[in-house]
Amino acid sequence: MPSWRLEGVDETARWPLKRNVPIDEQWLGLVKGGRDGVSLLLVALSWWKAATADGSSERDEYLSALDD
């Protein structure tokens, strides 16, 4: 995870992550999931949603990740 995502974030919670991307960010450290990376991401997000209840803090975290 890029260090700028955690700047000023409570170290115990680490949520929500910062979204202000520095202009000079190169994304060189991005880890890719190969040919099926996007598919796996979508499956994981759908499982996360299915495992959470509407209005719960877990659903709020899921929605924040989805928005990200």
Image (spheres, helix red, strand yellow):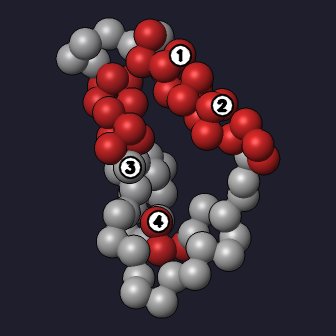
Residue 24 percent across, percent down from the top left: 48, 89
Q: Name the N-terminal-most of marks 4 and 1.
A: 4
Q: Residue at x 45, y 51 (%)?
A: 14
> Residue 24, relative to residue 8: is it above or below?
below
Mark 4: amino acid: Leu
Front of the two marks 2 and 1: 2
Circle 3 sits on which residue? 68
Helix, strand or loop status at disc 4: loop
Q: Secondary structure at mark 1?
A: helix
Question: In the rendered structure, which disc, 2 or 4, sits on the residue that comes first in sequence?
Answer: 4
Which sits in the foreground, 57 or 23?
A: 23
Q: Would you say 24 lies left or right of 19 here?
A: right
Q: Which amino acid, by three-letter code, is at mark 1?
A: Trp
Q: CA distance from mark 1 to mark 3?
A: 17 Å
Whether residue 12 appears in this view of the structure is yes
Q: Nearer the viewer, residue 40 or 21?
A: 40
Q: Along the polypeptide, which appears first: circle 4 or circle 3?
A: 4
Q: Earlier in the sequence, mark 1 or mark 3?
A: 1
The earlier-in-sequence mark between 2 and 1 is 2
- Looking at the rendered structure, the kind of residue marked 2 is Leu
Q: Given the image, on which type of amino acid does mark 3 rest?
A: Asp
**Residue found 53% across the figure and 16% down from its top:** 47
* Residue, far front: 35
